[in-house]
Image (tube, rainbow, N blue to C red):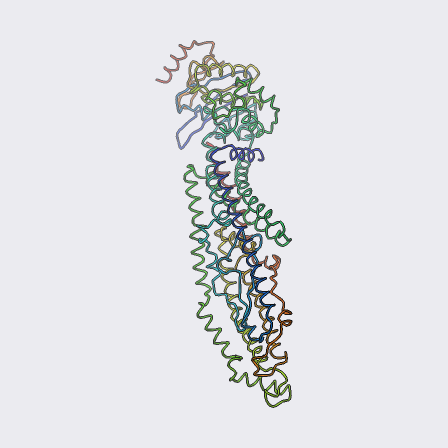
């Protein structure tokens, strides 16, 4: 579903992504680990069609993100580090608004179901976003992607700043989404969360994928050790 | 697009700060509308009372010498229309009352360009001040961070991920803020209309429509340009500063600079020069109080020949009346000549000033606003012409009565009776039809449309270069 082939991207002569090859299949969650500036966000922005690769191909569901930007975006659910929604609208109103932007019209019941599925407590549905915690906003963000029946989820540091409970809920939600057939790519600093949620893990350093492994093959402590070693070398 | 517009309006309605500002603004607006309307109604009432009083006095003349009545004269009034409350234009300078008297024509020596200067509007709570200065400021404050805030919060990305195209978002944002201005405009026009339901006629509806279109186009240009800066500049403060700078140049500096230049390019005579020239020309003519000159002699010979008599005392009519009418006719020629020259200069000033609209849509807005409200210098001139036409007929009736009413030459004590004075019709103001003056405002509308077009192009180009990240 998500495919990057020999992708190169540089900014003013500085290489951000170097010869990157990645693949995430249906029902799979891939975690991208890396320090700041490793190329995680650049990779996600190329998948979103906001950045053009200098060379190589970036595809979602066999659609080139450069040539078919609009079609590709319709398939993607994007959850940024901070989901900043409209503070003067409630969670359900935000969801309704973004669904309508995508040309989707749902009943109140359906919208509530989406929010429930994404773990937002019912009593919060009609509260203004201004009163939401970061975790609650993330849930609405995921509900927006979920409601548009995204086939691909791209998450940029989704757990950053979340409390352990919210972070755990997010993990469960991502697993649920993947189990329903979506391909999930998650960029993060959080080694333990990535190990817990993702099926596969890639370590990015200076724009290159220096290591790719299955989560099952490594314990959280081993992953941390491995990651630190790669970062030092 | 409609969804984005709707959402923007949600923000306006739900944001306490914006709602407070909007409500405060609407209240101020309503106060200005009521005050404007009250002033118009009061003025019209006063004019009506004064007009009736003057007519009553005129009709109550028992007996009077017609020439005495010509100097007794009368006053005529231009009632303010419904749109006067929205834009009183030059009325506060020119006034709406003119005196009608024998030998004396009304003059226009104030410059059209000078009247374009509306800085004097500051400090007075008038609808035109709010519509031309304050609403645009409010629109700038609403629009300057419209796109930037979406960009900085990351919502722009989310919107694009929902399949929206950037141009759609940009135009929807522009239209949503524009509609806010339009709502205020509609509110003010609606309130005025409701307050004056009995005085609405078809020409006024056309005027209101063009008035509305002019403001609508200006607000669009202003909103679009602000949104353009919001797209192009990385910092919202820079977008605000740029637009406030433009607003100041457009509304304060540019009109003043252009006004001064136009007055230099097309110079009007000073009041003293104008009056001296009129006096010189007129003194060459016949004057009923000064009968010793060549033209009087020529006229005298003509009349004596016509009546086949040798002396004025033998005439069956009063030669003084003929003499005064002849002087009047000559005075009219002098006035036509000077007034015509003045009108040409004023026309040139207006046309040159209007061309400034290509660089500054505010100039086009002001011209169109005053013009469609029927309160610019052009409409004042139309009023002057009507009054002068009335004055000529009025004085001619009196002079003819003096000449052919039954008195003899030199009989200044002869008096016409009450029925004669009653038979002279009062001045009836005919509002200038928009169709007869519309051509003068086409250039303003064209420039406003031009600005709307330019801003749309800027928005399209700006959208293409819009940085999402």
Residue A40 in the image: state x and y as whole percent. Answer: 44, 23
In the rendered structure, the answer to whether residue B45 lies left or right of residue B111 reads right
Q: Nearer the viewer, residue A99 or B313?
A: B313
Q: Nearer the viewer, residue B372 or A45?
A: B372
In the rendered structure, the answer to whether residue A190 lies left or right of residue A149 reads left
Counting the numbered discs, the total is 0
Residue B437 in the image: state x and y as whole percent. Answer: 59, 59
Give the vertical position of A101 relative to B47 (above or below).
above
Residue B402 in the image: state x and y as whole percent. Answer: 60, 78
Q: Residue at x 41, y 12 (%)?
A: A223
Q: Residue at x 57, y 20 (%)?
A: A114
Report the quarter where the N terminus of chain B lies: top right
User: Which residue in the rendered view is the most extreme toward the left?
Assistant: A232
Give the vertical position of A217 relative to A90 (above or below).
above
Q: Nearer the viewer, residue B283 or A131?
A: B283
Q: Residue at x 60, y 83 (%)?
A: B408
Q: Nearer the viewer, residue A212 or B120?
A: B120
Residue B6 in the image: state x and y as whole percent. Answer: 56, 34
């Amino acid at each position: 579903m998500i495919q990057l082939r020999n992708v190169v991207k540089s900014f003013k002569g500085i290489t951000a992504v170097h010869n990157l090859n990645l693949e995430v299949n249906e029902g799979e969650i891939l975690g991208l680990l890396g320090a700041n500036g490793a190329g995680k966000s650049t990779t996600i922005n190329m998948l979103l069609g906001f950045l053009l690769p200098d060379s190589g191909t970036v595809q979602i569901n066999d659609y080139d993100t450069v040539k078919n930007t609009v079609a590709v975006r319709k398939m993607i659910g994007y959850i940024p580090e901070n989901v900043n929604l409209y503070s003067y609208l409630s969670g359900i109103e935000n969801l309704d608004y973004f669904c309508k932007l995508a040309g989707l019209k749902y009943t109140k019941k359906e919208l509530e179901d989406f929010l429930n599925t994404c773990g937002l407590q019912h009593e919060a549905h009609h509260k203004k976003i201004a009163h939401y915690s970061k975790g609650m906003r993330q849930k609405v963000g995921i509900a927006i992607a979920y409601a548009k029946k995204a086939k691909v989820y791209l998450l940029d540091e989704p757990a950053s700043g979340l409390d352990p409970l919210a972070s755990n809920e997010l993990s469960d939600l991502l697993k649920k989404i993947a189990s329903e057939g979506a391909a999930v790519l998650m960029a993060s600093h959080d080694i333990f969360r990535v190990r817990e949620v993702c099926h596969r893990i890639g370590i990015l350093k200076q724009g290159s994928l220096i290591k790719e492994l299955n989560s099952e093959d490594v314990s959280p402590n081993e992953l941390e050790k491995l990651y630190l070693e790669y970062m030092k070398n | 697009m409609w969804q984005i517009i709707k959402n923007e309006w949600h923000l306006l309605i739900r944001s306490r700060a914006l709602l407070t500002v909007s409500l405060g603004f609407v209240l101020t607006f309503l106060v200005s509308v009521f005050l404007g309307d009250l002033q118009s109604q009061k003025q019209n009432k006063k004019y009506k009372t004064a007009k009736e009083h003057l007519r009553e006095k005129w009709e109550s003349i028992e007996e009077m010498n017609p020439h005495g009545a010509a100097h007794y004269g009368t006053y005529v009034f231009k009632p303010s229309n419904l749109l006067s409350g929205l834009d009183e234009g030059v009325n506060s300078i020119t006034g709406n009352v003119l005196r009608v008297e024998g030998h004396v024509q009304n003059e226009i020596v104030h410059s059209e360009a000078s009247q374009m200067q509306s800085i004097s509007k500051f400090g007075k709570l008038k609808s035109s001040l709010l519509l031309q200065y304050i609403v645009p400021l409010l629109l700038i404050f609403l629009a300057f961070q419209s796109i930037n805030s979406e960009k900085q919060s990351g919502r722009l990305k989310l919107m694009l991920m929902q399949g929206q195209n950037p141009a759609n978002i940009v135009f929807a944002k522009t239209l949503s803020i524009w509609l806010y201005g339009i709502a205020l405009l509609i509110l003010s026009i609606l309130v005025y209309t409701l307050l004056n339901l009995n005085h609405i006629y078809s020409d006024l509806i056309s005027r209101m429509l063009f008035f509305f279109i002019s403001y609508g186009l200006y607000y669009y240009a202003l909103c679009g340009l602000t949104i353009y800066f919001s797209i192009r500049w990385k910092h919202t403060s820079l977008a605000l500063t740029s637009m406030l700078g433009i607003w100041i140049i457009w509304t304060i500096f540019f009109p003043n600079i252009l006004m001064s230049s136009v007055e230099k390019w097309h110079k009007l005579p000073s009041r003293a020069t104008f009056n001296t020239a009129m006096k010189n020309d007129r003194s060459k003519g016949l004057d009923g109080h000064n009968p010793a000159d060549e033209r009087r002699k020529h006229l005298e010979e003509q009349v004596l020949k016509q009546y086949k008599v040798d002396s004025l005392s033998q005439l069956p009519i009063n030669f003084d009346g003929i003499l005064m009418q002849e002087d009047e006719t000559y005075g009219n020629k002098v006035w036509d000549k000077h007034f015509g020259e003045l009108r040409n200069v004023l026309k040139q000033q207006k046309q040159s000033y209007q061309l400034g609209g290509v660089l500054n849509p505010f100039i086009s807005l002001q011209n169109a606003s005053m013009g469609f409200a029927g309160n610019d210098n052009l409409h004042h001139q139309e009023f002057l012409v009507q009054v002068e036409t009335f004055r000529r007929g009025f004085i001619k009736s009196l002079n003819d009565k003096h000449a052919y009413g039954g008195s003899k030459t030199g009989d200044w004590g002869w008096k016409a009776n009450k029925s004669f004075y009653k038979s002279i019709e009062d001045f009836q103001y005919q509002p200038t039809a928009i169709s007869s003056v519309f051509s003068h405002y086409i250039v303003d509308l064209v420039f406003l449309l031009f600005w709307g077009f330019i801003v749309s192009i800027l928005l399209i180009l700006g959208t293409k270069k819009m940085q999402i990240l």
